[in-house]
Image (tube, rainbow, N blue to C red):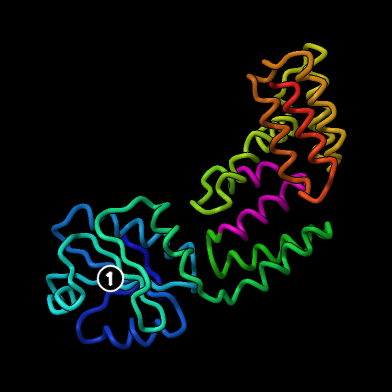
């Protein structure tokens, strides 16, 4: 089933100039040449629609059926399906020939510098997040995602906001299917942390051995935004048993370090201590 969106349209030889060339004066238009009989291009179309929905009003996907618009496929020298032409301000900036993985399509889109009208809104939301005004930051990130669903920066910011607000399970639902983007790796680093925090809140962490109580105490510190104390406690656990918590304690520490600003000198110190224990 294909997405229904104003940013995803079918174009032909009659409306191409209006819907693609003129529209591209202000937004990036991805022209996708495909055919109903081409299974790879059908699968490609589905992936492109998901990517386009993620970017919201920043890009438009224009679908060209080569059987219905042979003149367009001839004009753009399309000899392989699927084929993408990235058009911005009336010119072709990039093209992809043949089926490409999602990360490659996103990489090419991001390489085309387009003014983003939501950049200031995202910066504003992150400013409130850094000021620890989590109520305002959460509202702003949510408003951004209503306009541009699955935007990686807003999604990551909202997940961070949920963690700081002691709602790790909500963060987990955002992070577990995080979209391909420059923030994908950072999102993955947070997953072990939010899982452990969620287990603590649900009361499902083991409570039998001394290290169990130490781990729960560290998760309580993380819930309370006392990240230094949480990391200190987890480092002590690692010194005693590197295999504790299915060898995931180091991953939980790395998740907490994602929450600490790079400008904080203590972050570098914690990394050094972690490396000394592991290596």
Quadrant that contains the N terminus: bottom left
Q: Is residue 216 left or right of residue 170?
A: right
Q: Is residue 114 above or below residue 187?
A: below
State the image quarter where residue 20 is shown. bottom left
Q: Position of residue 31 (x, y in %)?
A: 30, 71
What residue is at 26 percent from the left and 60 percent from the top?
Answer: 97
Q: Which residue range is magenta in the image?
A: 152-172
Who's the residue at 67% across and 56% down the image?
157
x then y, percent, for residue 266: 85, 40
Q: Is residue 19 left or right of residue 246?
A: left
Secondary structure under badge 1?
A: strand
Image coordinates of residue 166 in percent, x first then y, are 77, 44
Task: Write down the quadrant of residue 145 in the picture.
Answer: bottom right
* 107 w.r.t. 213: above or below: below
Residue at horizontal 18 percent and vertical 68 percent from the top: 78
Looking at the picture, tell me which residue is in the foreground, 172 or 55: 55
Q: Is residue 16 magenta?
A: no
Give the labeled residue for mark 1: 63
Relative height, residue 25 to residue 39 (above, below)? below
Image quarter where the C terminus lies is top right
Residue 185 against residue 90 in the figure, above or below: above
In the shown orientation, is residue 147 left or right of residue 142? Answer: left
Query: In the rendered image, which quarter is residue 105 located in?
Result: bottom left
> Does 162 appear in magenta?
yes
- Residue at 32%, 53% (x, y): give it: 100
**What secondary structure predominates along the stretch shown in magenta?**
helix
């Amino acid at each position: 089933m294909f997405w229904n969106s104003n940013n995803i349209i079918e174009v032909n030889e009659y409306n191409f100039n209006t819907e693609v060339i003129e529209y591209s004066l202000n937004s990036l238009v991805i022209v996708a040449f495909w055919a109903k009989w081409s299974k790879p291009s059908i699968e490609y179309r589905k992936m492109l629609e998901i990517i386009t929905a993620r970017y919201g009003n920043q890009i438009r996907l224009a679908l060209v059926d080569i059987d219905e618009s042979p003149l367009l496929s001839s004009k753009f020298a399309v000899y392989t399906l699927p084929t993408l032409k990235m058009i911005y301000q009336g010119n072709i900036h990039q093209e992809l020939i043949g089926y490409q993985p999602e990360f490659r399509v996103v990489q090419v889109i991001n390489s085309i510098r387009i003014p983003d009208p939501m950049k200031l809104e995202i910066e504003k939301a992150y400013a409130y997040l850094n000021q620890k005004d989590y109520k305002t930051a959460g509202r702003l990130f949510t408003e951004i995602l209503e306009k541009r669903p699955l935007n990686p920066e807003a999604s990551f910011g909202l997940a961070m906001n949920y963690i700081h607000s002691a709602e790790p399970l909500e963060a987990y639902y955002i992070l577990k299917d995080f979209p391909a983007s420059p923030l994908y790796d950072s999102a993955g680093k947070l997953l072990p942390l939010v899982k452990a925090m969620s287990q603590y809140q649900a009361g499902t962490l083991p409570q039998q051995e001394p290290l169990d109580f130490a781990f729960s105490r560290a998760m309580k510190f993380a819930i309370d935004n006392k990240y230094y104390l949480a990391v200190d406690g987890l480092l002590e656990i690692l010194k005693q048993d590197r295999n504790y918590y299915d060898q995931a304690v180091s991953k939980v520490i790395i998740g907490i370090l994602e929450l600490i600003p790079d400008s904080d000198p203590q972050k570098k110190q914690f990394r050094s201590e972690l490396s000394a224990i592991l290596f």
